[in-house]
Amino acid sequence: MRTVCITGGARGIGRALAIAFAREGYRVSIMDLHREAGFEVIRQIRSMGGEAMFLQADAAEERDVERWTRLTLEEFGSLDVMIHNAGISRNGPLTELAVEDFDRVIAVNLRGAFLAGKHAARAMIERKTGGSIILIASTRALMSEPDTEAYSASKGGILALTHAMAVSLGHYGIRVNAISPGWIETGPWQYSADAHEPVHSERDRLQHPVGRVGEPMDIASACLFLAGPGAGFITGQNLVIDGGMTIKMIYEE
């Protein structure tokens, strides 16, 4: 049985990842700052007959990531897939954005990706198992809205980190890829007390060439593919999952 580790695995896309991998028979280890949401996911997986563990921790802190990966190995004996999903945004006018806010976004989103990859790679190399590391970026690495400098920079950095790590780790049998989601509606995948059904307009749907807004399971399906043997010849790549938005030419009327 294989083991997947997911940062930010308690809510939104991360929650869908945890459930999807559990359904495919993976043992699931998640890290998140939201304690109640984390344990809620673990209970759900165990009610499905799966194996899961949760650690309340900060993906930006190396001591937390090191402890989490160590506890995962002690509990499950392997670490086969690492997904860095934890991410935050603190948007605001560039001229007023506090450097502390900029640094925190970079710490969670980009340094967190580095730390997840570093400690997953250590485990995979020591055990000579190979593995898959998947970093969740964003279409904001490729295109921007106003006042998103910290978030866009962090996600752009993830794309560069992805191909650098892929080259460094390839000879160990470790593949590293990124996924860049577009508009993904996470409302139903929040902590139960915060979950809500989305309301989308016809315009929301039709601006996407596929005719709908994305769902967390769209990202989970792609992660399962990249983690599996069918993606054995894929590394250093960025898979854009946005319903076609980034290839659509848009002019304001």
Image (cartoon, helix red, strand yellow):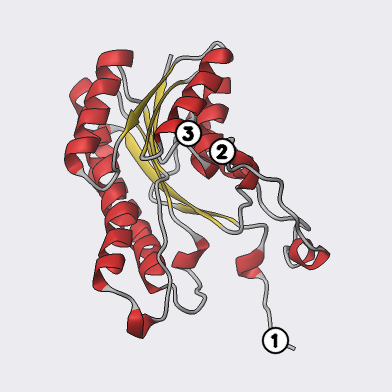
Q: Position of residue 162 (x, y in %)?
A: 34, 52
Task: Report the residue marked by disc 2.
Answer: 220
- Where is residue 95, by image quadrant? bottom left
Q: Residue at x 51, y 72 (%)?
A: 143
**At x 50% / y 30%, what residue is drawn?**
18
Question: First in sequence: mark 2 or mark 3?
Answer: 3
Q: Which residue is mark 3?
A: 37
Spot occupied by residue 126 in the image (x, y as percentages of width and height) = 18, 25
**Which residue type does callout 1 highlight?**
Glu
Q: Residues within 10 Å of mark 1 (few under 14, many from 20)?
A: few
Foreground disc of the pair 1, 3? 3
Q: Is residue 183 left or right of residue 143?
A: right
Name, please, the residue furthest toward the front.
Answer: 193
Label pair 2/3, CB-CB below 8 angstroms: no
Image spot of residue 251 (x, y percent): 69, 85
* Placement of the C terminus among the 4 image quadrants: bottom right
Q: Residue at x 45, y 43 (%)?
A: 234
